[in-house]
Image (tube, helix red, strand yellow):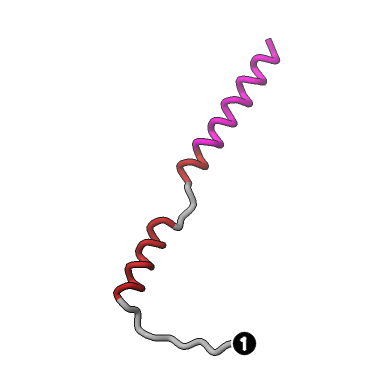
Amino acid sequence: MREMSFKPLTEEDRQKNQYLDKINHAPYPTIVLIAMAMFVLFTIGILMGAF
């Protein structure tokens, strides 16, 4: 295994980390909207099939 060396962050490293922290997250609102849409479509399909 390669030896890890730690050094102080440069300003460029800090900016990269801030950018990655901002964009690197799960799209929770999109996931919730897709799940709700699937639930509504499934419910409509069941209701249409029942009548």
Decide which of 19, 51 is in the foreground and name it.
19
Image point (59%, 30%), residue name: 39
Horizontal side of 14 relative to 51 (left or right) equals: left
Decide which of 9, 25 is in the foreground and name it.
9
Q: What stretch of residues is rendered in magenta? A: 33-51
Image point (38%, 68%), residue name: 17
In which quadrant of the rendered view does residue 21 lie?
bottom left
Residue at image mark 1: 1
Residue 28, given in percent of the width and then of the height, sits at 48, 46
Decide which of 22, 42 is in the foreground and name it.
22
Residue 10, given in percent of the width and then of the height, sits at 32, 78
| Three-letter amino acid code of the residue under disc 1 | Met
Q: Is residue 43 magenta?
A: yes
Residue 16, given in percent of the width and then of the height, sits at 37, 67
Up-down relation of residue 28 to residue 18 (above or below): above
Q: Residue furthest right?
A: 49
Decide which of 49, 34 is in the foreground and name it.
34
Horizontal side of 48 relative to 9 (left or right) equals: right
Crowding at mark 1 (Cα within 10 Å: few <14, some 14-19, many 20+)? few
- Predominant secondary structure in magenta? helix
Horizontal side of 40 relative to 22 (left or right) equals: right
Q: Is residue 42 magenta?
A: yes
Q: Quadrant of the C terminus?
A: top right
Image point (70%, 14%), residue name: 50
Q: Quadrant of the N terminus?
A: bottom right
Image point (50%, 40%), residue name: 32
The residue tagged with tag 1: helix, strand or loop?
A: loop
Q: Residue furthest top?
A: 51
